[in-house]
Amino acid sequence: MASDLTPRTQGTGPRGAAAGARTAAAGQASAWPAAAGPRDPDARPRSRRQWRQRLEIAFFVTPALVLFAVFVVVPIVQAGRYSLFKWNGLGPMDDFVGFQNYANALGDAIFQRAVTNNLLIVVLSIAIQLPIGLGIALLLNRNFAGRTAMRVIVFVPYVIAEVVAGVVWFLLLQPNGPLDAFLDTIGLGFLTQVWLGDPEFAFWTVMGVLTWKYVGLAIVLLLAGLQGVPEELNEAAQIDGASWWQTQRKITIPLLGPTIRTWIFLSMIGSLQLFDMVWILTKGGPANATVTMATYLINQGTERSQYGYASAVAVILFAISFILAILYQTFVQRGDASDTKIVRRRKVSR
Amino acid sequence: MTTVAAPPRGTRPRPAAARVRAARRRVGPLVYVAAVVVALATLAPVVYALLSGFRSNAQLAATPVSLPNPWVIDNYINVLTSDSFWRYALNSSIIALITTGVVVVFGVMAAYPLARYRFQGREGLYMVFVLGLLFPATVAIIPLFLQIRELGLVNTFWGVALPQAAFALPITVVILRPFLMALPQELEEAASIDGASRIGFFWRILVPLSGPGMVTVGVLAFVGSWNAYLLPLLILNNPAMKTLPLGVADFNTQYASDTAGVLAFTSLAMVPALVFFLTMQKRIVNGLQGAVKG
């Protein structure tokens, strides 16, 4: 080992300096310990070694940071600037209106409807998908023939593109369309609806399609959580005479807590950003019954070229998402799933 | 990383007594009934689209729900012989491949120092990416569109792929960092003894070894790009540049009366994603679970 290193560290010029720098990085990262021998003394200026390490870090991180800055950070900052102007996106941006766009948005009945719809979708998605997802996950966690196939099947809707699923559902839900015909056939004809055209009912139709599309994610995540529940606990409970349902209710579901809370977080963020499915099914109609913040944003921005106003809406949408996320992380996920802890809990897996 | 498909009960050697208990817990017929109901509700729309693509519009009008009788293959033939379908598929593929390539290369490069260097501000830098998880493209879509227009990337593949890659970076870094951290320290020591620099270690040892992690994030990025709608909708308005989801949405509005044709087009747009999912199922599921739970 020592003899192998000798020529390298004794070499002069840039090569020797490079070895020294590597040593510095190693000393701190506890990597390259072999090189941190006595032959690489403090004589090597510490700042120079640090400088070399910083150069390496910069080399690795810069491409990602530049991409991130250009397409994520700059646009978000720019949104704040645009939102203070009345601007159609083409001419010079010189009509400064202060916070007028924000006032207009918050005072607009359609935007208020969009915010209400989004918050309803957040709550209803959780209230509907959690029981269904939990039920199916518990079902799929039992031993039965075809279980592996079932686990693939339940995830299919989640993988299909929103647009593709949306177009299929759009056709299924046409008046006197396939779904109505099916309901008639099985004797449930009284349930038929003007699914997407009725302002009273369209919202619930969209909720139904969203459940079909996204419940698979809840199932898959909960199944992963279930694998973390030690089998021995269930067996012990059964030896003590607990029924299957008692075991689930008293042992399994409480142990799923962190997984459930993480899923709720993902579902919440997703519901606030909802666009594709609504745009395909209803474009936010009829009579704004299914408008969401994102469909409103696109309507005002690209369709009506009110870029200043749409930027203000974007900032509000972002603020709502951000505040909800922070509140949730602070009060609900406190202690079990902050992002760093998620990472720390991960086991070595290869 | 756990896999959904591998039931822990079957894979773990267990004492005889436990196996007896497991056998006693055989499931009743109700479980099967429930499983069939769930499978039908999940797959019915997909199967309906695939099968109805084999029916004529007259058949669909007469009985909306029925098996094809007779089977008509014209709808599928028409789509498969049209230029636009293949162009959309090609455009989708190119954009998805660029997105995936950029995400994987930039992601693993950024994750490496975050995982294996120790330096001041490391956690702060990592938090930049974690916070990025809170910014899906939807929020920034209007200013993002203006930015892409400013860069002259409207109606180009890069104009869609680069922003998609940028918004996929946070999840990539969050998945890859612990993966790289888990590689044993001894490898680095051995590489250093053999005279490799840290950059040499990165290319020759770390990159090959983190293959599975890169495949996982690559698959997630690919699926996300393949399914994307909002960003391509704003950036690509030249018909020759459109992607499959845009094509599906356009076809649905332009040929609204040709229901059978729309169903055939939609089904064929669905097939690549389904095949890709079935072959990459474990990777996709692992990636999502890894991102959340680990």
Image: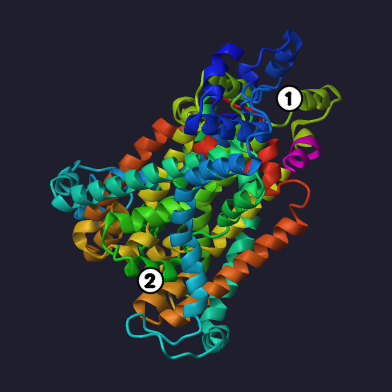
Q: Which residues are magenta?
A: A249-257
The residue sitting at 42% across, 51% down in the picture is B165
The x, y position of residue A269, in whole percent, is 58, 59
- In the displayed structure, A231 sits above or below A218; it is above
Residue B66 placement, left or right of B164: left
The colour mode here is: rainbow
Q: Quick check: is B5 in the magenta stretch?
A: no
Q: With respect to residue A8, does B251 lie above or below?
A: below
Query: Callout 1: few (<14), some (14-19), or many (20+) C-alpha neighbours within 10 Å?
Result: some
Which x, y percent locates residue A173? Answer: 39, 60
Looking at the picture, which amino acid does disc 1 mark? Glu
Please name the amino acid that badge 2 sits on.
Answer: Leu
Residue A225 vs residue B15, the one in the foreground = A225
The Cα atoms of the two marked residues, 1 and 2, are separated by: 54 Å
Q: Nearer the viewer, residue A340 or B256?
A: A340
Q: Is residue B282 visible?
A: no
Quadrant of the image occupied by residue B273: top left
Identify the disc placed on residue B146: 2
Predominant secondary structure in magenta? helix
The 10 Å Cα crowd at callout 2, few under 14, some 14 to 19, many 20 or more, is some
Chain holding disc 1: A
Q: Nearer the viewer, mark 1 or mark 2?
A: 2
Q: Position of residue A282 (x, y in %)?
A: 41, 68
Residue at figure coordinates x 54%, y 38% from the top left: B112
Q: Based on the displayed image, in which of its 4 quarters is residue A183 positioned?
A: bottom left
Q: Residue A231 shows which numbered tag?
A: 1
The local secondary structure at tag 1 comes to helix
Q: Is residue B287 visible?
A: yes
Query: Is residue A278 shown left or right of residue B255?
Result: right
Q: Chain of mark 2?
A: B
- Horizontal relation, residue A270 to residue A281: left or right: right
